[in-house]
Image (spheres, helix red, strand yellow):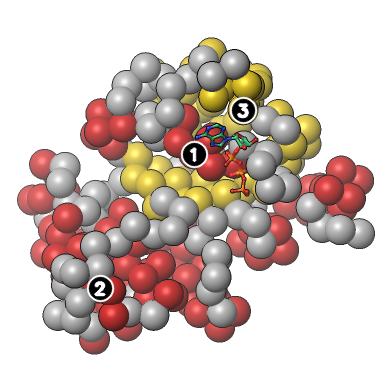
Amino acid sequence: MLEVRGLAARYGDAPALSDVTLSVDPGELVCIVGPNGAGKTTLVHTIAGLHPAAGGTVHIGGTDVTALPGHKVCQHGVATVPEGRRIFGHMSVRDNLLLGAYRREARRVHRRTEGEIYQLFPRLSERRGQRAGSLSGGEQQMLAIGRALMAKPRLLLLDEPSLGLAPVVLDEVFDALARVTASGLGVLLVEQDVERALDAAGRGYLLIEGRIVAGGSTAELRDADQVRQRVLGM
Ligand code: ATP
């Protein structure tokens, strides 16, 4: 599904990612954990075509998308839930969802997909006519995920979905992610709540200063000295 090999990215002369290699299979939730400034957001942006790669490759379902701009990468089935959610506050919940269905295949089935999203997040169904800006932070996160799912992606990239949310809402968000993953979607989750990320994922990678320094099952990661010292604070 997603194959990243030797990926590099920079801001001017400053390297932000070096030699990043990782993969996500269909039906798999893979997490990236790492301290602040490790390059997690840059990694999501570079995979999604929102930041240029300075080296290496990104393949989606076998197709090389490394040099494609963001709107073309979307057409290969990649949807991003950005940090800070970026929903359109003045528009209704439903209109925010419909904006997600911009791919031709997604537009054709948007009514059915919309129904599936309301099943996944019943709170959005109750509030479908309401201004999105009036939703709670947790509901806005659900809406951002719902909007991404409206594109019928094969791969979902999530940047820090837990940011600023109460634990009880996070349970709902992560339950939903487990369900969409079980339906066959590949999910790459970048998360500063390391405990929650390791609970939710099957596999993961530790990113430090733009490099992958450990990778494996979440059980292996929990035991890795670098994870314990650098992100779990043990
Ligand atoms: P956080 O968890 O704090 O969001 P992160 O792991 O997502 O951090 P990035 O935001 O990808 O890390 O940043 C990686 C490095 O690139 C940092 O050193 C950061 O200061 C730098 N950086 C990020 N965005 C820019 C930019 N627009 N211009 C210059 N440097 C940047």
Mark 2 highlights which residue? 132
Q: Is residue 63 above or below residue 111?
A: above
Mark 1 vs 3, N-terminal side: 3
Residue neighbourhood size for the residue with mark 2, other residues' Cα within 10 Å, grouped as few (<14), some (14–19), many (≥20): many
Residue 4 — which label?
none
Q: Which residue is mark 3?
A: 16
Q: Give the x, y percent position of residue 125.
A: 23, 80
Tell me the residue that label 1 is attached to. 44
Q: Residue at coordinates 71% horizontally, 29% vertically from top-left?
A: 211
- Left or right, 232 with reference to 55: right
The residue type indicated by label 2 comes to Ala
Which comes sooner in the sequence, label 2 or label 1? Answer: 1
Q: Is residue 42 above or below residue 116?
A: above
Residues under labels 2 and 1: Cα distance? 25 Å
Q: Quadrant of the C terminus?
A: bottom right
Left or right, 79 with respect to 17, comes to: left
Horizontal and vertical percent for residue 202?
Answer: 64, 52
Q: CA distance from mark 3 to mark 2?
A: 34 Å
The local secondary structure at tag 3 comes to strand
On whether ligand 1 comes within 8 Å of the CB at mark 1, the answer is yes
Decide if ligand 1 comes within 8 Å of the CB at mark 3: yes
Q: Quadrant of residue 123?
A: bottom left
Residue 40 image position (x, y, % from top left): 59, 41
- Asked if the residues shown at circle 3 and circle 2 are in contact, with their CB atoms under 8 angstroms apart, the answer is no
